[in-house]
Amino acid sequence: QRVYARCEQAIINLDEKNIWENLSFEKPPIGFTLEKPAKNAWGLSDGFLMHGDTALVPVSSLQLQQRHNTQNFLAALAMGSVLGLPMK
């Protein structure tokens, strides 16, 4: 995919493996999922946006709770972490 060409750090949707599974990345990509996340991934579990095992934000507190909005929130959290933005 051209969107990943020359990017320093890829953020990928782990739920859409067919998009990125055959691509190569300079650094391991950071992933997000609507399922329980792995250690360094972002995801959704027990009603919370998560980073690994750390609960961050209850989904019930989000004004936009549809599936695609939750994916956007997780992608934004992942990108914020790459940029070194504070979590608070």
Image (cartoon, rainbow, N blue to C red):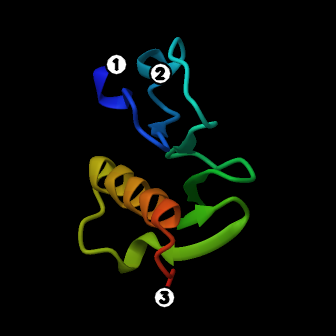
The disc at residue 1 is 1
Which residue is tagged 3?
A: 88
- The location of residue 70, given as percent across then percent down, is 36, 56
In this picture, residue 3 sits left or right of residue 9: left
**Mark 2 or mark 3: which comes first in sequence?**
2
Please identify the residue farthest to the left as the structure is shown: 64
Mark 1 vs mark 2: in front: 1
In this picture, residue 74 sits left or right of residue 81: left
Residue 46 visible in the displayed image: no
Residue sitting nearer the eye, 31 or 9: 9
Alpha-carbon distance for marks 3 and 1? Answer: 33 Å
Residue 64 visible in the displayed image: yes
Residue type of the residue flagged with mark 1: Gln
**Mark 3 or mark 1: which comes first in sequence?**
1
The disc at residue 20 is 2
Q: Secondary structure at mark 1?
A: loop
Disc 1 + disc 2, Cβ < 8 Å? yes
